[in-house]
Image (cartoon, helix red, strand yellow):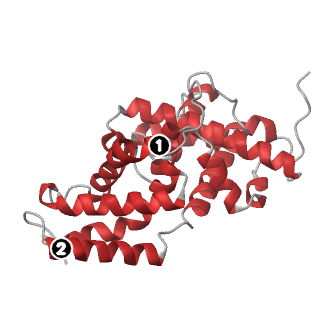
């Protein structure tokens, strides 16, 4: 049985979403979210925000020409040493 | 191309897989693609030269990011016009969910915002905030890994991350309202 009230559960929400809680506390927060529609809605919103952020920002990758330039610079450094 | 570290794998094998991460973090730190490219190249060359100091089996990504960050602070920070420093403690927007829970509780308006605007909103955050946000929420690093990379306590990582997310949400919400993706909440009575 969860002993957390809404304030306590939400205080742990960031750590919960990042999976950085002890198994006990993880269970406590999960139980609270299963029983509280308001906090569950909050958690889902935060989760969708974080997923959006990761998906969008990870699309940026090191351009091929930059990669090639760096590899060439490393080769030059290896020859020089 | 590169000689192995003390008892480990060659530099290329350990370092090159992290190039995308280094590039993204460099973009967030400099907010300038040309500077970011130079910063990543300088970082890789410095890392290559100090490769013997890397302890095999430890966190290569963190090791590279620490070099990137030190290089940025020492050689790049003053080259770039920093946004006007904000009073980090004073800025504390309320949780965005409370503004949208009646109109768009799933946050579907996020999906209407174009990639470039999301990036722009991240880059509008104060440097200390966007650095932690990038490492945690884009690169997926743990609190402990970030604390070690940035040489700051875990508590500081968490408080910066909390504020960074709140500020970013507020920025994205303002943009979404401006573009008509979402109706602004009625003013509180």
Q: Where is residue B18 in the image (x, y as percent from the top left)?
A: 36, 65
Q: Position of residue B183 (x, y in %)?
A: 90, 45
Whether B14 is drawn above or below A54: the answer is below
Query: What residue sits right under mark 2 in the picture?
Result: A78
Q: Nearer the viewer, residue B122 or B160?
A: B122
Q: The N terminus of chain B lies in which quarter of the figure?
A: bottom left
Which chain does the numbered disc 2 sit on?
A
Q: Where is residue B143 in the image (x, y as percent from the top left)?
A: 40, 42
Query: What residue sits right under mark 1 in the picture?
Result: B132
Which chain does the numbered disc 1 sit on?
B
Can you see residue B2?
no
- Callouts 1 and 2 on one subunit: no
Write the residue at 33% across / 48% down. B71
Tell me the SS state at disc 1.
helix
Write the residue at 26% across / 72% down. A74
Q: The C terminus of chain B lies in which quarter of the figure?
A: top right
């Amino acid at each position: 049985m969860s002993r957390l009230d809404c304030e306590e559960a939400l205080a742990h929400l960031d750590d919960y979403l990042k999976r950085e809680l002890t198994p006990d506390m993880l269970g406590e927060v999960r139980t609270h979210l299963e029983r509280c529609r308001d906090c569950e809605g909050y958690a889902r919103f935060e989760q969708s925000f974080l997923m959006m952020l990761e998906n969008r920002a990870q699309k940026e990758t090191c351009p091929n020409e930059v990669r090639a330039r760096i590899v060439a610079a490393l080769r030059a450094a290896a020859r020089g040493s | 191309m590169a000689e192995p570290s003390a008892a480990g794998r060659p530099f290329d094998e350990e370092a090159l897989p992290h190039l995308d991460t280094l590039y993204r973090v460099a973009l967030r730190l400099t907010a300038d693609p040309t500077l970011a490219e130079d910063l990543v190249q300088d970082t890789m060359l410095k890392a290559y030269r100090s490769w013997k100091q890397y302890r095999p089996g430890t966190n290569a990504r963190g090791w590279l990011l620490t070099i990137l960050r030190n290089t940025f602070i020492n050689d790049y920070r003053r080259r770039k016009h920093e946004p006007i420093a904000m009073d980090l403690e004073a800025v504390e927007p309320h949780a965005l969910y409370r503004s949208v829970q009646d109109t768009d509780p799933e946050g579907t308006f996020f999906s209407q915002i174009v990639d470039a605007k999301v990036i722009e909103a991240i880059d509008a955050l104060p440097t200390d905030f966007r650095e932690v946000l990038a490492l945690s929420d884009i690169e997926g690093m743990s609190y402990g890994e970030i604390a070690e990379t940035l040489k700051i306590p875990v508590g500081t990582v968490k408080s910066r991350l909390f504020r960074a997310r709140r500020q970013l949400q507020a920025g994205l919400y303002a943009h979404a309202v401006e573009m008509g993706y979402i109706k602004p909440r009625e003013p509180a009575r």
